[in-house]
Image (cartoon, grey):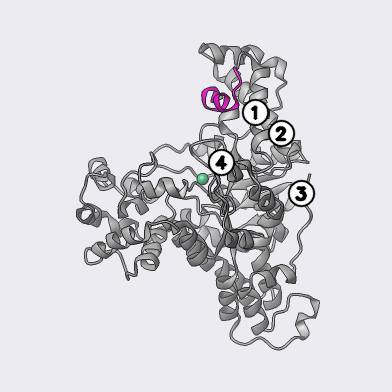
Amino acid sequence: MLSKSLSWSRRNVLKTGGVAGVAVAAGIQGGASAQSARPARGSPKSIIEQLVESTAIIDTHEHLIEEDLRLAGKHRLIKANDWSCLLSHYLNSDLTTCGMPRKELEAFFAPGTDPLRKWSLLEPYWQRVRHTGYGQAVEIAMMRLYDIERLSGDTVNKVQQGYERTLQPGIYKKVLQDMGRIESCQVNSLDTPFSESRQPLLLMQDLSFRGMHIGPDIESCAGKAGIAVKDLQDWHRVIDWWFRTYGPYAVAVKSQAAYSRNIDYEDVPAEQVQTVFKSRLNGDPIGNADRKRLEDHLFWYCVRKATEYELPVKIHTGYYAGSDSMPLSRVERNAAAASDLCKAAPDTRFVFMHIDYPYYEPMIALAKHYTNCYIDMCWAWIVSPVASVNFLKQFLVTAPANKVLTFGGDYIPVEPVLGHVVLARRGIARVLVDLVEEGWLNLESASSLAEPIMRGNARALFNLEHKARKLQAAPWISSNGVGPTQHIINQAL
Ligand SMILES: [Zn+2]
């Protein structure tokens, strides 16, 4: 079922405070009568930059671990609890592909290496990577969090001190909300299909269904459900349990299965994969064709459940994280397969993530053509900042404005999210300014896009107001005595 349609609402903009202030000061008042309002002050560029700067943003994709686990510094995804942590995800990939030898890379990220000596390991390669989106996000975060002008041998001491000073209770709120002006995040946990967050309104959660249809991951999914799996019907019951238990609290479902296959899922009936599932249970070898049919069947079982629970389906498309592994021949088929998904399930809202970089133009065509297709720019600003500008600029004069989501940090450590959101705001402002200066939009029209593409679209698509109310009364909140703080509740509502 599609959520209520979006329109730019002055009431919503007023709720963001600063936006309204800038808009009114600029003589931009949103409605049709705006043209007759006071004339704007300042250049279109400065008006739009102030507007984007002061507009709250919703972060539709993160892999943040719970704050208390991060503070403890012992999580398997945190290699070393020092300043190298900021480079561990994703800049480690650029460092690999620029030629940093594996031994030096491992020493740089190792917990046992003296943090101040790590600069000497990084320095020969830093100039090769500091200009990429990954590199810029890290350096911007360090500049803002640790008060340095650039990362260098002269500042590394201050960087390490700043890292230790900022890593204390409240760091997520400080980095995300106070400094990043991020209203709420949507976390895809890498530990469990659904994380019962202790900050549920700041760290809203996707229900990850990858393990329910790839593998499938019987051990980790069935255990928590308390169901002994002896056949395919039992596995369906396990999936049902996850949706029944967490569907009301999740904002969406998510699968990154595109890392292991194309997203070309056929609707295979259960009776055709009963024996394949038995083979999986018994640990017998399964051929590629049979494996695909089982995954296909389970994908659609999960997608139908998601649709029943009114949860959008987020799907990884395009570029692969990591290095030296991406089969571009598979990646380039994502867009065509995405169009088949949209056509096959018109009642399901599909969110295709990461603009399918580098194949982003077909995704604009899909969002324009299919009512149930949404494109998420999560991760994109750091994968390629300029391609992201090109994508959004084309998108806004091609497809309906409610079909795009413009930010997701996509990080495990929280600090570089700040650098990423700075790049995103810079890019969004650049796009709106370009569209005005090139004569495609007038100032009022371009300005009216900022709030929906940064915030309103996500609030409507993921039904965030309703989800926030549900999360306030989530059983794991009331049962363990950890209540969400009122200021977070207020901001999320
Ligand atoms: Zn991700």
Name the quarter where the C terminus is drawn.
Answer: bottom right
Classify residue 275 by image quadrant. Answer: top right
Q: Earlier in the sequence, mark 1 or mark 3?
A: 1
Please provide percent x and percent y for residue 325: 42, 37
Question: Would residue 183 be counted in the magenta stretch?
Answer: no
Q: Earlier in the sequence, mark 1 or mark 4?
A: 1
Please provide percent x and percent y for residue 446: 67, 72
The residues bearing labels 2 and 1 have C-alpha atoms spaced at a distance of 9 Å
Q: Amino acid at mark 1?
A: Ile
**Residue labelled with disc 1:** 239
**Residue labelled with disc 4:** 332
The residues bearing labels 1 and 4 have C-alpha atoms spaced at a distance of 30 Å
Question: Would residue 218 be counted in the magenta stretch?
Answer: yes
Nearer the observer, disc 3 or disc 4? 3
Q: Amino acid at mark 4?
A: Glu
**Left or right for 38, reference 104:** right
Main SS class of the magenta portion in the image: helix
Residue 305 disc label: 2
The residues bearing labels 1 and 3 have C-alpha atoms spaced at a distance of 27 Å
* Viewer-nearest residue: 156 or 320: 156
**Residue labelled with disc 3:** 371
Q: Secondary structure at mark 1?
A: helix
Classify residue 181 by image quadrant. Answer: bottom right
Nearer the observer, disc 3 or disc 2? 2
Residue at (40% x, 62% y) in the render: 141
Nearer the observer, disc 1 or disc 4? 1
* Viewer-nearest residue: 139 or 470: 470
Residue at (74% x, 46% y) in the render: 372
